[in-house]
């Protein structure tokens, strides 16, 4: 029965996704294009679809940015630890500073890999962690605030950039109804 209906129907391609459809189809089986709709309806569908595709691209890019942000912070923590290790004259404390920075770096790497699933929470968590660490440093040793100032500015810039793209991800997720 199905073969006879296929024989009777002319196979054409969908104007939107260019996959094979039959001229009896009302909607494209693949993309949902209104094959029997009027021109306005069809145009609207294509516009909507390309808008979603652009958003989906920026969505993927933002996830990547959020992830690399956290890896960058990890790298900067390692750099900061090594710099402090070299410049610190106190043999005992410089070792703990280095170890401390490496542990923080590992935490940021873990957040980076987690950010694929929960980018906004991962970035927010990373930012909070960084601010708390800086505050603790300041309480224990106020001199550290000016130490490695360039590295701190870089971390702040990188985190803000990641935060913006993570907010963007959540916005696009809502628009595209992506659940994750
Ligand atoms: Zn289609």
Image: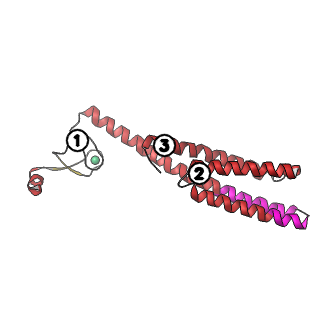
Dot 2 or dot 1: first in sequence order is 1
Q: What number is the disc on residue 172? A: 3
Q: Tell me which corner region of the image, top left, top right, bottom left or bottom right, holds residue 84.
A: bottom right
Residue marked by disc 1:
35
Residue found 70% across the figure and 60% down from its top: 105
Q: Is residue 106 above or below residue 138?
A: below
Q: Position of residue 18 (x, y in %)?
A: 27, 50
| Residue hosting label 2 | 66
Q: In the image shown, does 115 or 81 lie closer to the viewer?
A: 115
Question: Residue 153: x and y, percent?
Answer: 75, 48
Task: State the SS at label 2.
Answer: helix
83 falls in the magenta region: yes
Answer yes or no: disc 2 within 8 Å of ligand 1: no
Rendering quarter of residue 101: bottom right
Q: Is residue 171 above or below residue 77?
A: above
Q: Residue at x 64, y 55 (%)?
A: 70
The residue segment tinted magenta is 71-97
């Amino acid at each position: 029965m199905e073969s006879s209906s296929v024989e009777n129907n002319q196979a054409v391609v969908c104007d939107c996704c260019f996959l094979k459809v039959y001229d009896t189809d009302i909607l494209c089986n693949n993309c949902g294009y209104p094959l029997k709709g009027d021109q306005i309806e069809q145009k609207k569908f294509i516009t909507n679809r390309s808008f979603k595709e652009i958003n989906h691209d920026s969505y993927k890019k933002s996830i990547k940015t959020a992830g690399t942000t956290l890896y960058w912070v990890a790298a900067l923590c390692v750099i900061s630890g090594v710099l402090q290790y070299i410049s610190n004259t106190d043999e005992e404390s410089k070792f703990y500073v280095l170890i401390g920075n490496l542990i923080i770096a590992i935490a940021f790497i873990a957040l980076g890999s987690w950010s694929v699933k929960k980018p906004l929470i991962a970035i927010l968590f990373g930012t909070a962690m960084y601010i708390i660490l800086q505050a603790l440093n300041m309480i224990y040793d106020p001199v550290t605030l000016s130490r490695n100032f360039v590295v701190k500015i870089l971390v702040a810039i990188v985190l803000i950039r990641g935060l913006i793209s993570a907010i963007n991800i959540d916005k696009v997720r809502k628009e595209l109804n992506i659940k994750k």
